[in-house]
Amino acid sequence: MIPGVAEWVRTLIVLALLATLMEWLLPVGDLKRYATLVAGLIILLALIGPVWGLVRGLARANASRWLGTSSPSRLGQLVRRQERQEVSAVVESLPGVDGVTVTPHPGGVDVAVWGAHMAPGVAAAARAAVEEVMQVPAGQVHVVVQPAPGHREGRAGNEAQLAH
């Protein structure tokens, strides 16, 4: 017999014996009725517990198969990649931004933004997007705003600007 099933059956037998013993010992009256009700509920929960665990396990397996993941860590990787793509899309939609890279690390998130003619406030907007989408605390987002590669002239204040 499967070890998990044997343990489950053993638990049910012990609970049933305890409930029967309790019924024999309690005098007739309201207390006996309520005690029998509680014992029945406990046995019912013991019956349903393993079935509920099986249903949850099947639901997780189906979700993993549907998402194409085999482990919670893989699911976390997919979520982080989606967050990076969302931040990149938001920042690239800002006026004058030609490209962006988002690099998370244990100490926070680094964002590099480049473009030929970026509007002022790009660094603040990029920081706000990272903080909101990736749930990174303020002060852990570092944004570097640079002119586009191969573009020597930039707007004042946008060349190699480091924003913390």
Image (tube, rainbow, N blue to C red):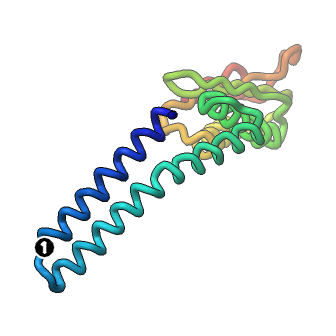
Question: Is residue 60 visible in the rendered structure shown here?
Answer: yes
Count up the numbered dots: 1
Q: Position of residue 29 (x, y in %)?
A: 15, 85
Q: 118 or 17: which is nearer to us?
A: 17
**Rendered residue at 53%/52% (across/down):** 51
Q: Residues within 10 Å of mark 1 (few under 14, many from 20)?
A: few
Q: Quadrant of residue 145?
A: top right
Question: Is residue 124 visible in the rendered structure shown here?
Answer: no
Q: 51 or 162: which is nearer to us?
A: 51
Q: 34 or 103: which is nearer to us?
A: 34
Drawn side of residue 12 relative to residue 155, left or right: left
Callout 1, which amino acid? Leu
Determine whether 151 is above or below 65 in the image.
above
**Rendered residue at 26%/73% (across/down):** 36
Q: Position of residue 139 (x, y in %)?
A: 48, 33
Q: Secondary structure at mark 1?
A: loop
Q: Position of residue 46 (x, y in %)?
A: 40, 55
Determine whether 146 is above or below 79 in the image.
above
**Rendered residue at 11%/78% (across/down):** 27
Drawn side of residue 109 relative to residue 112, left or right: left
Q: Position of residue 31 (x, y in %)?
A: 16, 79
* Quadrant including the C terminus: top right
Which residue lies under the disc numbered 1?
Answer: 26
**Rendered residue at 65%/43% (across/down):** 129
Which residue, as the protein is rendered here, is positioned at the far right? Answer: 150
Q: Quadrant of residue 156?
A: top right
